[in-house]
């Protein structure tokens, strides 16, 4: 079973850490600005006074959540993250999506031809690592 790992997100104003299980991001722990940390709000909404308290609560809750997950859940999460990252990369490179073209055809930023029907297969075959 993979261990939980954390990576700090450097582009945030508040301290923010992404939590990973294997290669799948499964959560986020971060500071909040201007939020009143009243005790009655901490546990039900996942709010803690310190990062260490949040980390400990997350790790305590994780086994119960993991017991309800299947490998198909993690695979779907990876596909969705890759598709979102791919879409943003297409936008950032000024490359139109097939859905933005009247004939439903386009070209990926990597040069591969695309149609509305082939986008999902193309992302799975060529760009699953784009979201990392």
Image (cartoon, rainbow, N blue to C red):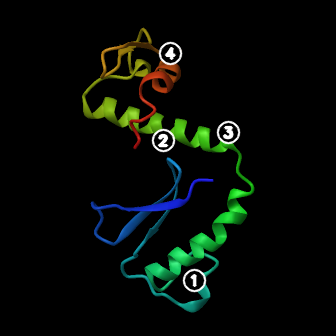
* Foreground of the two, 4 or 98: 4
Secondary-structure class at tag 1: helix
Quickly name the residue at label 3. 72
Quickly name the residue at label 4. 118
Distance between the alpha carbons at the discs numbered 4 and 2:
17 Å
Distance between the alpha carbons at the discs numbered 1 and 3:
32 Å
Distance between the alpha carbons at the discs numbered 2 and 3:
14 Å
Secondary-structure class at tag 3: helix
Distance between the alpha carbons at the discs numbered 4 and 1:
45 Å
In the image, which disc is placed on residue 81? Answer: 2
Q: Earlier in the sequence, mark 1 or mark 3?
A: 1
Distance between the alpha carbons at the discs numbered 3 and 4:
21 Å
Residue 17 image point, x, y percent:
41, 65
**Left or right of residue 31, residue 5 in this image:** right
State the residue lying farthest toward the right: 68
Residue 45 image point, x, y percent:
59, 75
Residue 121 image point, x, y percent:
52, 20
Quickly name the residue at label 1. 42
Secondary-structure class at tag 4: loop
- CB atoms of marks 2 and 3 within 8 Å: no
Residue 113 image point, x, y percent:
38, 11
State the residue lying farthest toward the front: 1
Residue at x 48%, y 61% (from the top left corner): 5
State the residue lying farthest toward the left: 93
Residue at x 58%, y 84% (from the top left corner): 41
**Left or right of residue 95, residue 81 in this image:** right
* Disc 3 packing (10 Å; few <14; some 14–19; many ≥20): few
Residue at x 64%, y 73% (from the top left corner): 60
Secondary-structure class at tag 2: helix
């Amino acid at each position: 079973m993979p261990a939980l790992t954390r990576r700090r997100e450097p582009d945030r104003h508040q301290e923010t850490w992404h939590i990973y299980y294997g290669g799948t991001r499964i959560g986020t722990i971060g500071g909040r600005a201007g939020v009143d940390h009243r005790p009655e709000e901490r546990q039900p909404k996942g709010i803690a006074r310190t990062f260490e308290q949040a980390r400990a609560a997350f790790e305590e809750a994780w086994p119960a959540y993991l017991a309800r997950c299947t490998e198909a859940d993690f695979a779907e999460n990876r596909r969705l993250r890759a598709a979102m990252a791919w879409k943003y990369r297409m936008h950032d490179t000024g490359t139109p999506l097939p859905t933005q073209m009247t004939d439903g055809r386009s070209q990926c930023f990597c040069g591969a031809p695309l149609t509305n029907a082939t986008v999902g297969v193309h992302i799975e075959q060529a760009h699953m690592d784009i979201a990392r």
